[in-house]
Image (cartoon, rainbow, N blue to C red):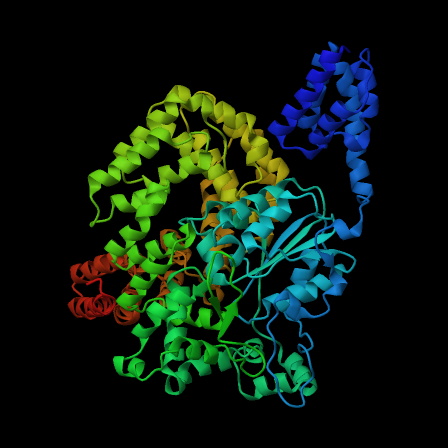
Amino acid sequence: MPADAHQRLAEGLRTLYEAAGSPTLRGLARRASERSIAPSASAASISEWMNAKSLPARQGDLAAVVAELTVSANRPAHQEMKRLEELRKEAQQSRLRKPVERDPGKWLGKPVELYNDPIRLEVHRPIRIAGAPSGVPDYIERSHDRELIDVLLSDGPQFIVIVGGSSTGKTRAAYEAAQHLRGWNLYHPVAPSKPKALTAALESNELNKRTIIWLNELQEYLLPEGGEQAAAALNDFLGRVPTEVKVLATIWPRYWQDLTSASSPYPHARSLLNSMAVRIDVNPKFTSESLRTAARADLRIKAAVKAGAAGVTQYVAAGPALLEFFHDCRDINPGTYAVLSAAMDASTIGPPDLVSDSFLRVCAPAYISPEEFGALSDQWLEAAIELASKELRGAARPLSRIRPTASSGPSYRLADYLIQYAQSERSQKPVPKLFWDSVLSTVDDPVTSSVFARAADERGMFETAAALWGPLAHSGDPEAMGALLGNPTVDKRAAHDVLDRFIQHVDVSDTSMVAWLLSELYHHRAERSLLAARLAQNSKDLAIGRSFDTFLVFEQLEEAGAFEAAKEYALLIKRSVDLIIRDDFWSVITLIEALEESIVDGAPQASSELAQAYYENNVMSPEHLAAFLSRIDPTSNLARKARRTLHEVAGSADLIKVLTIPPYIGGLFFSGEDDLARAALNRVATQIGILELDSSYAPLDLLDMLQNRGYRDSVVELADRISLEFDPGLSHAARVALQRLKKNECVDAFQIMATRMAEAGPVLPLLGASELIQFFSAEGLIDLSRTYAKRVSEFQAAEGSG
């Protein structure tokens, strides 16, 4: 091979690496440029120094290498491909058989057995009681522990998320499970920030194949600035890593819901949790026998049982002591009460992260009377924080000081238990006007600003929201632009000008940004049309992104009549199925359905290939199989195979969690599986009393399904449960629930829930509250309308939005 061909080979391999992102190709490029190869060497002789360990694991990468080699050596590609494919298979087997030999000190993390103190991994310190053992109490197993261990010990990479409230024992459960993997490394990414540390670890080449990545309080990795990058990196890592890395995470239920809901402003986190996570819910209950045994051995457990604590783990972690301190501290030091109140509201309205010294100094005085504040010393904040930082019962501090960084002053973290209490009890309470002044004067990072801006919009604080959204809009934040267009205090012409300039210059190859913009412009037809025109004009630059983002781009092209551009995009989707099939299930089938029903040439074929690839590469639950079958061509061979699989696994369908029931049974009926659907619905109808309701619309969807199929007694029973137990969480959701009860003629349940919502239901967002007041009036419920309107008016007056 001539010397210039050798140089082209080296350069070509570097180009391939940049395109494919493969470390193996980087190695090949380096060896091609560094190793001495005779100018007359053929591609065959070059392949000899490419031993099995140096070859790409993916066949697509291998084909790219072969193409570059054969072009340089002017040899038929099929001759080299056969030999190199054999080496590639050998390389895969070699990787599976042998761990990579490396100095143990160079891997991230430490051996699991070195973490002999659970508190080092953020397990809560237990309370101190004279005569009790030192350290954490002996572990008491619950029903979720066996499920957790079974998943952790299964083959292949796993992303396990343990879901439970503060101090319910989720971190301790993770710690105890990790002890079953002794001999593995455990890596806890923390600095310089949790999102950055996680992203850096995943993008490094320093994770041993037998490593547990420890992500306690997962929301602290996914919600702060850099969280979306961390979520995308973890999603990609789990989809491509060939090793048995385990990601062990914990999260509160609220944050799971916030991140996975369809309206979540965190698309990468939503995709990660919905498509990759194995969710394990903490069972808060211990068996009576296990508690009696533990109480005999540990005075701390005995004290919790004797106190009648509903949550033994919370009691031992000083949860009740924290709450008791908060309620009592106003008489001791009003400044401490004010500081904790401001911190609790900040964690409820904004990100559950840190509160700064400057925020507390401005905001806290609003939580006590002028007389109380006047009696405080000049050093009131320091004294208040000192008292709030004292350890209670040797276990927990209400407020913990965090070491300042070079770019920030002193800041504090509120105890988890107090955050959970605040989110449960204070989320629908007004905050003082000074709270928002403090936000405007102290908050400057984009993620925190956007969270507070959303809250300000919900609370009718439109001028505050505009002030927070403004800088974000000018920096290119689509959500901020959409929010400003709907803000009554903003000059619409100026808002449109900012948006139009952004549309003219947006990088159309940034699929995530384009899709985000399309979502925010849903109610703004003119701007969507302008963006669609840009996409069509630059169709060759469009790229594939997450499934739902890809769906939005394709849908917009088709709606705008840009059929040629939509055709090109459908062909791109068809060529990119390997990238798409690792994504969130519901997003993937949304894309499959859109392509299947499209009139664009080539779109149904892309749908078929995507569906086939997803089916072959993913194990689906019965619920997912039913939904999948309802979205694909019912006459295809794939549909027949999926139908057979569905019949084999239908008996394991979860018919207790209401969230899974409507899509499962609805999918069965839609795909013609009436016998399976009726059998499932019969079973559901007989167990209404034990169904697990949640705060989604799923119970209301099930109510409609039962009514439409003639299960009247079950409708009444479910409606009664909804009227007493359903927590809509948001004012507009309360209205929807009442409308569905009325539609299904559940008169008694309707009246009970209407009264409950008027007297104690959510008032946020205020726009939904206004609609609920009108709904009460239209239904002739004048007294309830007045009761609810009075609550809303008092909220607005207290907060300053009235």
Residue 384 in view, yes or no: yes
> Which residue of the protein is positioned furthest toward the front in this rendering?
378
Locate residue 140, reporting x and y percent. 67, 75
**Quadrant placement of the N terminus:** top right
Q: Across the whole image, how many numbered discs are drawn on residues?
A: 0
Residue 364, image quadrant: bottom left
Q: Is residue 630 visible?
A: no
Q: Camera-side residue: 754 or 573? A: 573
Comparing 783 with 463, the one in front is 463
On the rendered structure, is 465 left or right of 622?
Answer: left
Q: Nearer the viewer, residue 585 or 182?
A: 182
- Report the side of 350 relative to 319 (left or right): left
Residue under the point 56% across and 50% down: 196
State the image coordinates of residue 352 (x, y, percent, origin top left): 45, 62
Q: Quadrant of residue 311?
A: bottom right
Residue 351 picture location, percent across and down: 43, 59
Q: Horizontal placement of 330 versus 432: left or right?
A: right
Residue at left offset 39%, top offset 57%: 711
The x, y position of residue 719, in whole percent, is: 36, 64
Q: Quadrant of the C terminus?
A: bottom left
Foreground residue among 737 and 453: 453
Would residue 14 appear left or right of 798 to someone viewing this image?
right
Q: Is residue 299 above or below residue 476?
A: below
